[in-house]
Image (tube, grey):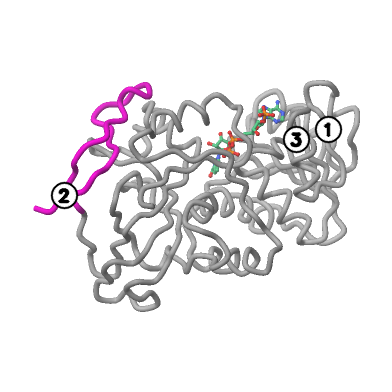
């Protein structure tokens, strides 16, 4: 059996369960590709799965390789994986139920993999798929955002939020972002028309009559957000809709995202990136062997934009 270097978890727990070691190299099934991983993007779901929060839902068999964002090069295409060629540079969001990309190789169904934006290197490209798909699916699949509308983007400097700001501006919406003061200039540079320092100002007193709210936090922030929507407006959450009774009072609706891999949407996103309309912000890059440090940074809540693991130079 051929092996590869990978980071795996053999038990759920803290960052110490991330072990850099040899693991079996995967083989693609029909319709799949084998990707030689150059970089793996990190998302909050990585440390949530590591900690065991999703074990009843995803029912992984351990050991598990985390990391569901990949950028790399096609090494093998199995029968039926027709739109991708060996040697092609690709990126994609992987299936949470399977092994991820904290490894030298990963397999995936060809349909969820897209050509990498040519204007990005692998580290930048690995920062895109899951967060950009989440942003895209919130705005366009769930909220139906259109030109001329106003959106309040909570967590505008975050992994998903920084794509939400850019996609909403591209669509022609007015964007009001919330962020800590240290991130205000960053959020303005992304295209936000206004930035609210959520630690200094109550957003619900500063904003009203918006068409869409993007909520990556939930809880109290969500409860306070319903009132800033116009009648018939929509709040899209990446967590859960925990205060539907308040939504009903204000005659607005809530939508919960469950992000899904989508090669077609990633192709559209790659075009926008190559046209210079959308850009990922990578705040930190770590070697694969230092995945635990990367988790620590993302878990601290201090990271702006995205954190990425470099797997190959
Ligand atoms: N359901 C799904 O399909 C799906 C998909 C993608 C992501 N998610 C979830 O969505 C959440 C966000 O993901 P992410 O990748 O964007 O995480 P992230 O990169 O950690 O960003 C979270 C952002 O929230 C900001 N924030 C924290 N408290 C805030 C508050 N009270 N008001 C305004 N902003 C606040 C943080 O900014 P500061 O640094 O200023 O505090 C940070 O920029 C995570 O829980 C993730 O698991 C779910």
**Of pointers 3 and 1, the one earlier in the residue sequence:** 1
303 or 195, nearer to the observer: 303
Horizontal relation, residue 61 to residue 169: left or right: left
Dot 1: what SS?
Answer: strand
Q: Which residue is mark 1?
A: 196
Horizontal relation, residue 29 to residue 185: left or right: left
Disc 3: residue Cβ within 8 A of ligand 1's nearest atom: no
Q: Which residues are magenta?
A: 1-25
Residue that sits furthest to the front in the current view:
313
Horizontal relation, residue 278 to residue 31: left or right: right
Tell me the CA gap for discs 2 and 3. Answer: 52 Å
Q: For the residues labelled 2 and 3, say whether their Cβ atoms are less than 8 Å apart.
A: no
Residue that sits furthest to the left in the current view:
1
Tell me the CA gap for discs 1 and 2. Answer: 50 Å
Give the class, few, some or many, for how many residues have Cα within 10 Å of label 3's Cα (few <14, many ≥20): many
Q: Which residue is mark 3?
A: 247
Ligand 1 is located in which of the four quadrants? top right
Task: From the top left corner, tell me how far across and down residue 66 is, in percent.
Answer: 35, 40
Q: Is residue 178 above or below residue 4?
A: above
Task: From the top left corner, tell me how far across and down residue 14 is, in percent.
Answer: 37, 21
Tell me the CA gap for discs 3 and 1. Answer: 23 Å
**Of pointers 1 and 2, the one earlier in the residue sequence:** 2
Q: Is residue 165 above or below residue 15?
A: below
Q: Is residue 72 above or below residue 252?
A: below
Instruction: Please say whether residue 41 is one of the residues in the magenta stretch.
Output: no
276 or 111, nearer to the observer: 276
Residue drawn at x 44%, y 38% as measured from the top left? 286
Task: From the top left corner, tell me how far across and down residue 287 is, in percent.
Answer: 39, 40
* Marking on residue 3: 2
């Amino acid at each position: 059996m051929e092996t590869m270097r990978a980071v795996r978890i053999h038990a759920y727990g803290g960052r110490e369960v991330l072990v850099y070691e040899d693991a079996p190299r995967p083989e693609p099934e029909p319709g799949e590709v084998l990707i030689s991983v150059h970089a793996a993007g990190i998302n909050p779901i990585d440390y949530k799965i590591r900690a065991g929060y999703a074990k009843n839902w995803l029912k992984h068999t351990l050991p598990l390789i985390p990391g569901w964002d990949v950028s790399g090069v096609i090494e093998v295409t199995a029968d039926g994986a027709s739109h991708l060629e060996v040697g092609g540079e690709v990126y994609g969001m992987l299936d949470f139920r399977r092994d991820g990309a904290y490894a030298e190789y990963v397999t995936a169904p060809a349909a969820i993999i897209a050509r990498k934006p040519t204007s990005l290197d692998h580290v930048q490209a690995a920062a895109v798929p899951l967060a950009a798909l989440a942003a895209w699916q919130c705005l366009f699949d769930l909220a139906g955002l259109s030109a001329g509308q106003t959106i309040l983007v909570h967590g505008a400097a975050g992994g998903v939020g920084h794509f939400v700001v850019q996609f909403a501006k591209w669509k022609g919406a007015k964007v009001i972002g919330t962020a800590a003061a240290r991130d205000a200039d960053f959020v303005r540079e992304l295209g936000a028309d206004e930035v609210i320092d959520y630690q200094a100002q109550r957003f619900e007193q500063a904003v009203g009559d918006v068409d869409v709210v993007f909520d990556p936090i939930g809880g109290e922030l969500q409860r306070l957000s319903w009132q800033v929507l116009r009648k018939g407006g929509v709040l899209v959450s990446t967590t859960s809709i925990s205060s539907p009774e308040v939504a009903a009072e204000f005659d607005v609706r809530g939508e919960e995202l469950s992000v899904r891999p989508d090669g077609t949407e990633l192709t559209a996103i790659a075009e926008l990136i190559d046209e210079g309309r959308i850009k990922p912000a990578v705040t930190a890059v770590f070697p694969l062997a230092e995945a635990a440090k990367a988790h620590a940074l993302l878990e601290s809540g201090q990271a702006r934009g995205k954190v990425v693991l470099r797997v190959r130079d």
